[in-house]
Amino acid sequence: MKRTAIALAAAAFALGLATAPAYAADAAAGEAKAKKCVACHGKTGISKSKAYPNLAGQKEKYLKDQMKAFRDKKRKNGIMNAQMRKFSDDDIANMAAYYASLGCPQ
């Protein structure tokens, strides 16, 4: 009986964690953090140079994964590695939410 109660409690706890809402990124905070990105990626996330990718309208998870890869030097680019090193996971999530919120360019 005691084992059953413990198993049920553990299952309920695990279910609660599995259904807990995910942290919602703050696009407004992301916009503030992305001020330095404007020089290469444009004020609206659309680059004026073919050398730099557009960020506006990219999928949030893709942006987050790429920014973390640059920060953690899993993706190599001297400029981006240096730029991203100062950002926390929350900063990156917020910037990804911001750029994803801008929508795809027409």
Image (tube, rainbow, N blue to C red):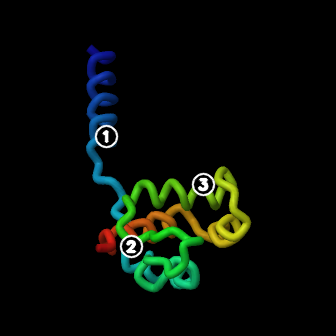
The residue tagged 2 is: 98
Q: Residues within 10 Å of mark 1 (few under 14, many from 20)?
A: few
In the rendering, which numbered label is found on residue 69? 3
Q: Residues within 10 Å of mark 3 (few under 14, many from 20)?
A: some
Give the residue drawn at x 27%, y 17%: 4
Q: Earlier in the sequence, mark 3 or mark 2?
A: 3
Give the residue drawn at x 60%, y 54%: 69
Give the residue drawn at x 45%, y 64%: 93
Which of the 4 quarters of the picture holds residue 67? bottom right
Q: Secondary structure at mark 2?
A: helix
Q: Position of residue 39 (x, y in %)?
A: 57, 84
In the rendering, which numbered label is found on residue 106? none
- Three-letter amino acid code at disc 3? Ala
Q: Residues within 10 Å of mark 2 (few under 14, many from 20)?
A: many
Q: Position of residue 76 (x, y in %)?
A: 69, 56
The residue tagged 1 is: 18
Q: Secondary structure at mark 1?
A: helix
How many marks are shown on the rendered structure?
Answer: 3
